[in-house]
Structures are given as C-alpha cells and as structure tokens.
Image: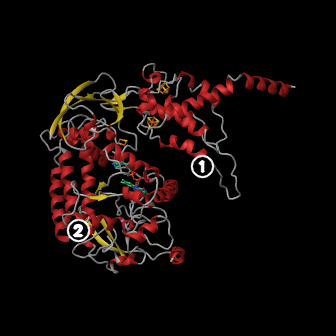
Amino acid sequence: MTTATFSIRRGGPTGGEMVDYQTEVSEGMVVLDAVHQIQAESASDLACRWNCKAGKCGSCSAEINGMPKLMCMTRLDTIPLDVPVTIEPMRAFPAIKDLITDVSWNYEVKKRIKKFKPRPPDAEDGTWRMQQEDIDRVQEFRKCIECFLCQDVCHVLRDHAMHEEFIGPRFLVYSAALEMHPLDTEDRLQELKDMHGIGYCNITKCCTKVCPENITITDNAIIPLKERVVDEFYDPVKKFVKLFRRRKHDR
Amino acid sequence: MFDDIPDLYKDQTADTEEEGWRYVIGDRDARRPPELLTRDHVARCIVREVKAGRGSPHGGVFLDIAWIKEKIPNAAEHIKKKLPSMYHQFKQLANLDITEEPMEIGPTTHYIMGGIRVDGDTQASTVLGLFAAGECAAGINGANRLGGNSLSDLIVFGKRAGEYAAIFAKENGHGTIDNDEVERIAKGTLEPFEREGGENPYTIQQDLQEMMQELVGIVRTEEEMVQALEGIEQLKRRSANTFVPGNIDFNPGWHTALDLHNLLTVSEAIARAAIERKESRGGQYRDDYPAKDPEFGKVNVSLKKDADGRMQIARVWIPEMPVELKQIIEEMG
Ligand SMILES: Cc1cc2nc3c(=O)[nH]c(=O)nc-3n(C[C@H](O)[C@H](O)[C@H](O)COP(=O)(O)OP(=O)(O)OC[C@H]3O[C@@H](n4cnc5c(N)ncnc54)[C@H](O)[C@@H]3O)c2cc1C
Ligand code: SF4
Ligand code: SF4
Ligand code: FES
C-alpha cells in the first residue's frame, strides 16, 4: 500500500480552491475510486458526478492533471503518484460545486438540431433496406456517451466561449450521424454553416484526442460535414446550376 | 460445469465441450453449453470453485474466450467486433487483452427481483396513487430475470405505469398533505448536520454491504440470515446517529445518511422474505433447503408495515395465469 495526494478543486460556482487529500492507493484503482475513498474517509461533502464506473454513462468527466478524462477510466498506475494528482471540473462549463459542472447548455444545443427524418418505408411491412457499408459509416458516431470532454477541450468553447455561435464537436458528431444516415432525408447544411458555426472549427483535432470512445471526430465527422457545406454553398458549378434553376423557377 | 447441470435444463444442455462448440458456431442440432445456464447457477458454480480452493488470485475464476483462435481464423477481430465494450474495458481498466489472455471474473449484484408489489396491468401499488415500474417493482421476472428482459420491462411497463398514473390523477385530483408531517420529515432530514461527533454514514453503508454479501448472498442459510437481521437492528441504531459536514447542496455524505434508511429497509425485507421461503428457486439458493418446493411455487412472500412500524410477513397466492398467456406458453412448448 502506498499513500498518494490528490489535489481537488473545492468550492461553489465562483472562486474555489485546491485542497489536498491523502489516501491509500492499491492495485487496479482508478481516479474515481480515489475520489470515493476520499469522500468516505475525509470529505463526505465532496461533490462529484458518476454513475456506471464503466465508462458508459459519461457523467464522471473531469480534468485530471489538466487533461480532460473520465475519472472512472483513468487508472492510477497511468499517472505519476509521487506528486499530487490534480482533479478539477471541466472548464468549458459553469461550475456548480467541487467537481460538478452545469452541462445543460449541451442539452439545449441538441434540441436545436433537426431530428431524424426517415424516408418512407421501402417495404409494405413498414421496414427499410440498407446497405451494411452505409450503416457502418455512422455506427462509430453512435458510440458517443455524451461525456462532453470534446466540448471541454475545444478552444472555440473553452478559450473563446463561443457557446452562442458554435455547437461544438459533440454536436457536429451528432449532426454527422444524422446527415450520413442512409435513411435520413432532412437537410441540415444551412444551419451547420450559419447557426451551428461549423466554420469556427479549424481542425486542431484536440477533440479526437480526448474522446474516451475513440470516435474519429475530426476526420470522420467534421471534415466530411465541412466538405458537404462547401459543396453546397461554395461550389461554383453548383452555384451556377442553382442560379439557373432559380431563374427558371422565377419565370 | 458438465457434471453440475440442473435436471430442469439437462435436456437442453450439451454433454460435451465438442457439442457446446458446435452450438456456438450455429449447429442447430447441438445444445447450449452449460456456461449459458441461468446466471444464478453460473454464480453458484463460481462460488463453489472458489470455496474449493480453485479460485483465481483475486478470488474469482478465469473466463477464457481467447481459445477460440484455435478454432476459427481472425479470432481476435471477431472478439473485438462481437464484444467491443468488454474488449475496451478490460484493455483500459485491467491492461488485459481478452483476445490473448483469460479474464478474471466473479459474481456481483446484478438485479433485484423483489420490489414494490404492483398490479400486473396498471402497475398500481397497494398505496393509493403510487405506481411503480422497472427494477423497483416486483413480479414480472418471477424468481429469476433472464438476460435482456429488464429493458423490455422498462419500456412496456414504464409506458403502462405512466398512462395509468395519468388516468388516476385525472380521476382523483390531488390528495391532502399533512403539513406537520412534511415539516417533521424535513426537519429529520437535516439532523445529520447537527449531530457533531456522530458516525460517518459511509462506514455504516459499507458495514451493511459487507454483511449482506456475506450472510444474505449467493448461498443462504437460515442461521446466517437470522444473524443478518440482528446485524440490521444494530446498524439501524447506528444510522440514527450519523453526522455529515457541509450543507444540503450536492452533498453525497448527506445523501448516504438519508439513503441508509432505505438500504436498511430493503435489506431487512430481503432477509425476512428469504428466511420465509424455505426452498431454492431462481436467484434464491438455500443451502438448508436446496430443492424447489412446488408449494412455494404457488405463493409470493409479501411484507408490509404494521401499525407499530414493524415488518409484517405473509404468503399470498399468486393469481392464476390468464388464459391467453397460458396459451402462448403452451404454444412455445
Ligand atoms: C452491470 C449491469 C448490466 C445490465 N445489463 C442489462 C442488459 O444487458 N439488458 C437488460 O435488459 N438489463 C440489464 N441490466 C438491468 C437493467 O440495467 C436495470 O434493471 C434497469 O436499468 C433498471 O432501470 P430502472 O429505471 O427501473 O431503475 P434505475 O435505472 O436504477 O433508476 C432508478 C433511479 O432512481 C434514482 N433514485 C434512487 N433513489 C432515489 C431517491 N431517494 N430520490 C430520487 N431518485 C432516486 C436513481 O438515481 C436512479 O436514477 C443490467 C444491470 C447491471 C447492473
Ligand atoms: S478539431 Fe475543431 S471541434 Fe475539434 S477541438 Fe479542434 S477546433 Fe474544436
Ligand atoms: S464525441 Fe467522444 S468526447 Fe465527445 S461527448 Fe461523445 S464520447 Fe464524449
Ligand atoms: S461513471 Fe459512468 S462514465 Fe465514468
């Protein structure tokens, strides 16, 4: 048994301070275990969100030694324990208490994205037919556990606080899952360009690096969406065709 | 496990590893391998192995799926595709590649089969206006929930509970609230903040957890469960003397202090009902009554609070199965 020090952010919505706690660590422990141990031993009012302890519910997001991570999936033997381990709440969202942040902005953003609109059923019995490869393309996006770690790390939200203008990587993944769905008939490109701010993403790939589900956010979701937006609004040939169509229509 | 297959499942279970493998690769003439028997049986087999001194280093057993590479090409890819979460979790949490090495496993709490007694159609409980569905409700799974059935339960009976609760609310309006009672309870919930020098609620929770695991766990006996009831009484006294620092905002210590009452109530109900049921059936395994007793198959054990606040136990007849359900079961053979 060895003792390790955890420096944890304590406090309400503003201010707050880092407080050091010592606890014994043993084989197989993750950061969330240490936090629970600290709650049981020396700080029973230490607030942290968690539920599954299996990397599936997305509620235990925090910044461990400055890195956005799930506390339940971060093994203690992957971080140095000879110096204090810092645990802070996600910075891109308002703090509520200790390690808990208010992530409700994300739920509001999600409501603004146009829902799935499938084409009419292909068969009489109300079912559809799809190609496996078309489904495989969106399968990756469905792994998202809504931990919002990608939102936390994205500089557009984290450093520039453009929460009004930009929906963030999580919701670009969500939009991509809908846009690339073989049955979907909705068009979300106009919003992506104008209200959802896809142009603010400058492809730094930080979001991809922190995703605990290893979703290739930038390459597989954002870049293809950007390409679609470009094709739709900036492609000279298409623009011409559109103009022509509109004229025809005007007549 | 081939030498320990319950009689009920003998006809449907493979006799040899060879037959089990054929089942796995889709041979319709082969029967299921015994690892796919019900969870309670598998859990007991694990406990038996550990007790016999054949357990793994951390007190479980080994589960090996890597060996299929001897049987099929691309086994590693196949495992990753079929069990993506398990592969990912073992890799990240245990630094172990399940396509290469065996996993160490052991039984943990998975589901609670008992719960709030509800009407099967409306999900109304015996408390007027209280509806329950899902894991907190009792009945739908009988003595043993089968894999996957919780999700279907939640969707079907959650919808029903909501609909019938809405009808009830429309028809009945709201009841009256005893303000004095509300105030008394609200005041009571704040007491842990004032009991400077009281006990840490986490310690009590942990003691309860360990005791229930040991005395009312996978293999049960009357003697141990009676011991548990005594333990619960002691813990109840301790739970009335908890102290928590801080205030009511997002305070997990305070929540634990408040949860103790419910945890102890449920623990006591489980122990009392398990003592009353002098047989083994589904998730309940009694070492002192290892066989199934058809008489107990006709009753549920029901507990309610009497006028003094104590648990009152009764056996109630299970209603006759509706004709249309019986028909379905017969059709399925
Ligand atoms: C590891 C594991 C794997 C499983 N896998 C499967 C599977 O593959 N398929 C399947 O069908 N089932 C599975 N189950 C079972 C299934 O997940 C659960 O039975 C189901 O999720 C229960 O849902 P519920 O809504 O009834 O209860 P819960 O999801 O437990 O919801 C209860 C809610 O009540 C809240 N609560 C508790 N106390 C209070 C209080 N005092 N005040 C306010 N709120 C309170 C809790 O926070 C919680 O949110 C699994 C279970 C486990 C543990
Ligand atoms: S790639 Fe785009 S969305 Fe992802 S972190 Fe960078 S700027 Fe943000
Ligand atoms: S995309 Fe990845 S990092 Fe972002 S919310 Fe989903 S799971 Fe979390
Ligand atoms: S507790 Fe659910 S993801 Fe960590």
Name the residue at 69% across, 23% down: A235
Q: Say what secondary structure mark 1 lies in.
A: helix
Label 1 within 8 A of ligand 3 by Cβ: no
In this rendering, the label closer to the viewer, 2 or 1: 1
Name the residue at 39% across, 50% down: B86
Say which amino acid is labelled 1. Gln
Q: Position of residue B100 (x, y in %)?
A: 35, 51
- The reply to whether residue A43 is visible in this rendering is yes
Q: Position of residue B94 (x, y in %)?
A: 30, 46
Q: Give me the chain letter of mark 1.
A: A
Do discs 2 and 1 share a chain? Answer: no
Residue placed most toward the observer, B78 or A144:
B78
Name the residue at 66% across, 35% down: A187
Say which amino acid is labelled 2. Arg
Quarter placement of the C terminus of chain A: top right
Q: Give me the chain letter of mark 2.
A: B
Specify whether B225 is left or right of B96.
left
Q: CA distance from mark 2 to mark 1?
A: 49 Å
| Label 2 sits on residue | B220
Q: Position of residue B298 (x, y in %)?
A: 37, 77
| Above or below, comparing residue B45 to residue B59 in the picture | below
Q: Which image quadrant for residue B213?
A: bottom left
Name the residue at 47% across, 50% down: B81
Q: Which image quadrant for residue B316?
A: bottom left
Q: Which mark is residue A132?
A: 1
How many tags in the picture? Answer: 2
